[in-house]
Amino acid sequence: MQYDNKISLILDANSKNEAFARVCVSAFATQLDPTLEQLEDIKMAISEAVTNAIIHGYEGIDDGQIFINCKILKDTLYIEIEDKGRGIDNLEEAVKPLYTSKPDMERSGMGFTVMETFMDSMKVVSEINKGTKIYLEKKISKN
């Protein structure tokens, strides 16, 4: 498929890079002329995905990287966020609202729910000891 534009980012799995990822993806999305609300939705979803990769995917791993690919086709932003970490033991359970594997860290268990709520589409693929990939889509409609 021929996209109108695309970018790729590789970031160290460091919490300091979460804001950078959010800003980069939202800056890329601005070429679609989104509303401020749509930009905030994108930023929120990116924050949750990157934070999940850092906290869960690379728990106990010091040298992890997060791979972000963004593509635009017509009026839709496609985002892939991938880690090559631990993977998700029980994906069906993990995507349920309020499920958290880190109650001691005061995690709300709403990461996937937030992504699903603020984006038009979300798909999660995970394999134990190979990592997790999150696919997000956001259609930018002109009001």
Image (tube, helix red, strand yellow):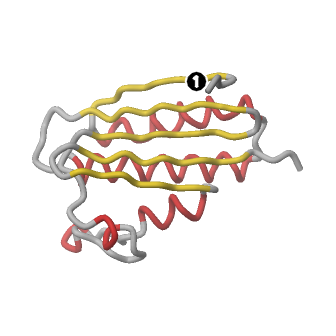
- Where residue 141 sits: x, y (%)? 81, 47
Does residue 75 appear left or right of residue 10 in this picture?
right
- Where residue 35 sits: x, y (%)? 77, 46
Give the residue displayed 73% in from the left and 28% down from the top.
31
Residue in the foreground of this view, choosing between 112 and 35: 112
What secondary structure is marked by label 1? strand
- Where residue 101 sits: x, y (%)? 23, 69
- Where residue 12 sits: x, y (%)? 28, 31
Q: Quadrant of the N terminus?
A: top right
Looking at the rendered structure, the kind of residue marked 1 is Lys
Residue in the foreground of this view, choosing between 28 and 23: 28
Residue farthest toward the front in the current orientation of the protein = 1
Rendered position, 125 above or below 18: below
In the picture of the structure, the residue carrying the numbered disc 1 is 6
Give the residue displayed 18% in from the left and 52% down from the top.
128
Residue farthest toward the left in the current orientation of the protein = 60
Residue 67 is drawn in which quadrant? top left
Does residue 31 appear left or right of residue 93 in this picture?
right
Does residue 134 appear left or right of residue 65 in this picture?
right
Rendered position, 121 above or below 11: below
Give the residue displayed 89% in from the left and 50% down from the top.
143
Rendered position, 66 above or below 131: above
Residue farthest toward the bottom in the current orientation of the protein = 98
Residue 75 is drawn in which quadrant? top right
Crowdedness of circle 1 by 10 Å Cα count: few (<14), some, many (20+)? some
Residue in the foreground of this view, choosing between 117 and 37: 117
Give the residue displayed 21% in from the left and 35% down from the top.
64
